[in-house]
Amino acid sequence: MGVLNVTPDSFSDGGRHFGPEAALAQARRLIAEGADLIDIGGESTRPGATPVPEDEEIARVVPLIAAIRAESAIPISVDTMKPSVARAAVAAGASLWNDVTALRHSPDSLATAAELGCEVVLMHMQGEPGTMQAEPRYDDVVAEVAAFLADRAEAAVAAGVAREKIWLDPGIGFGKHMIRHNLPLLAGLQAIVALGFPVLLGVSRKSFIGAVDGGKRGADARLGGSIAGALWGARAGVAAVRVHDVRETVQALRVWAAIAAAG
Ligand code: HH2
């Protein structure tokens, strides 16, 4: 899954693809580099990001989805917590709703997902985007994230979302201490995969990579760690990895798979 943020302030690529021309050019690049899916977001989830009104978010993502759909059949997901944005995105050609709140943001979220009939990613987050990194706490991060995701999947099914449309995501970096929570959660990823749904993993350019690497270097200097995370996820059986650097990740996954197949 290639990431395309049409925001001025995303932590990883903020502002770079903000204009319509630049965004479409980046979508073409992600497709050419081997993405199987493009995730389009119009509101940053990083702590301190400015909230985006829904009409503005729709104006950012919908024309881009329509423009990609006009020239490519690649599946498109929309990264939003707002049901109205998901609805507009699906009408424009998106087939997956990627919701970092696991359909908890609005009282309409569950019913809208059921009505749209699209695939949904239910992601784990402790707290709210603005404050989630203030003081995250877990007794057993793997068990708590797994229990939350199982619970949200059941809530979605109870609301009418088809079981086979559901993806789960442990939400690396969302309400998790960089080292004490993200690393054990990644180490225990198989417990999330064992829940029986396809798992999406997003580690690309995240801060914990900088923390492990001992420095405060920026998001651009985290490619090696991002690839390590993607390969770790593949080994644990995740169905997709959400990445900014598609070409390098595809190559790494192809080499890993070729070696595995030769054994
Ligand atoms: N991470 C980010 C945003 N959306 N969605 C899922 N399902 N999983 C993730 O790990 C995930 C996500 C954060 O990364 P990015 O989009 O680069 O930054 P921002 O939220 O600042 O736009």
Image (spheres, rainbow, N blue to C red):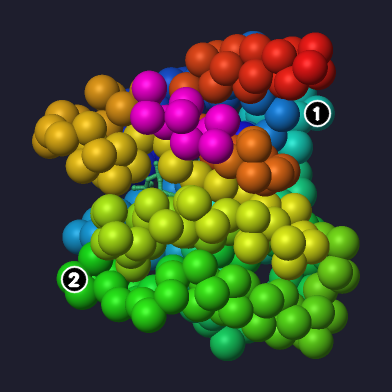
Q: In which quarter of the image is residue 18?
A: top left
Q: Is residue 193 left or right of residue 178?
A: right
Question: Which image quadrant: the N terminus?
Answer: top right
Disc marking residue 73: 1
Say which amino acid is labelled 1: Ala
Residue at 48% in and 51% down:
186
Q: Name which residue lies at 70% across and 44% down.
A: 237
User: Dot 1: few (<14), some (14–19), or many (≥20) neighbours within 10 Å?
Assistant: few
Q: Name the residue under label 2.
A: 134
Give the image location of residue 13, x and y in percent. 33, 32
User: Mark 2, residues whose alpha carbon is within 10 Å: few (<14), some, or many (≥20)?
Assistant: few
Mark 2 residue type: Ala
Query: Which secondary structure lies at badge 2?
Result: loop
Point 43% across, 36% down: residue: 204
Question: Image check: 8 left or right of 67?
Answer: left
Q: What residue sits 29% from the left and 60% below the top?
A: 180
